[in-house]
Image: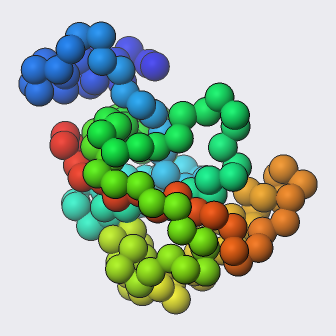
Amino acid sequence: MTSEVEQYWQTFIKEQNLSPERQPAEIYSFGNTVQMANELAVLVISGQKKATTSAIDLYEPNEHVPQAGDYNIILDGQGKPAAITKTMSCKIIAYNKVSADHAYLEGEGDRTLDYWRAVHEPFFTAEYAELNRTFEPTIPCLCEQFMVVKS
């Protein structure tokens, strides 16, 4: 954690009267490019992006899997803190069963399920390919909903 991120976190836990030992569950940026990270951070801060989806079977054995109650630091494309979110719910759903409601909460593009699939299928395909695996429409997805608690 950089000193800037650490200071951001310490300010938050003092404001929220959380234990000084409390740590963020994850510190990350959305997407896989600087531009995407910046665009999605703006959507989070504005309150338009309230959900995200990940491929649950690509988590490493010792990697943290999101769960309700987690606090996460969202970074912009330059690695600077943009927001702190609190995970409200997590559900495992097959990719081809992700709902239009969840796509809307992701807040991207025109917020439709068609748009969601048009951007997520290539993203997941690339993620699977990096591990010499094949994306299938039935992959299990972790659909997470969150709220911004600091921006």
Q: Looking at the image, is 126 positioned above or below residue 33?
A: below
For the point 45% across and 33% down, the residue is 26
* Residue 24 in view, yes or no: yes
**Position of residue 43 measured from the top left corner of the image (x, y, whole percent):** 32, 62
Q: Looking at the image, is 29 positioned above or below residue 54?
A: above
On the rendered structure, is 143 left or right of 31? left
Image quadrant in which the C terminus is located: top left
**Position of residue 49 measured from the top left corner of the image (x, y, whole percent):** 32, 63
For the point 78% across and 68% down, the residue is 135
For the point 42% across and 76% down, the residue is 103
Q: Nearer the viewer, residue 112 or 75?
A: 112
Q: What colouring method underlies this structural image? A: rainbow
Q: Looking at the image, is 129 positioned above or below residue 26?
A: below
For the point 44% across and 18% down, the residue is 2
**Position of residue 62 measured from the top left corner of the image (x, y, whole percent):** 65, 29
Q: Looking at the image, is 46 positioned above or below residue 131?
A: below
* Residue 109 in view, yes or no: no
On the rendered structure, is 8 left or right of 124? left
Q: Quadrant of residue 75?
A: top left
**Position of residue 117 measured from the top left corner of the image (x, y, whole percent):** 57, 80
Q: Quadrant of residue 68?
A: top left
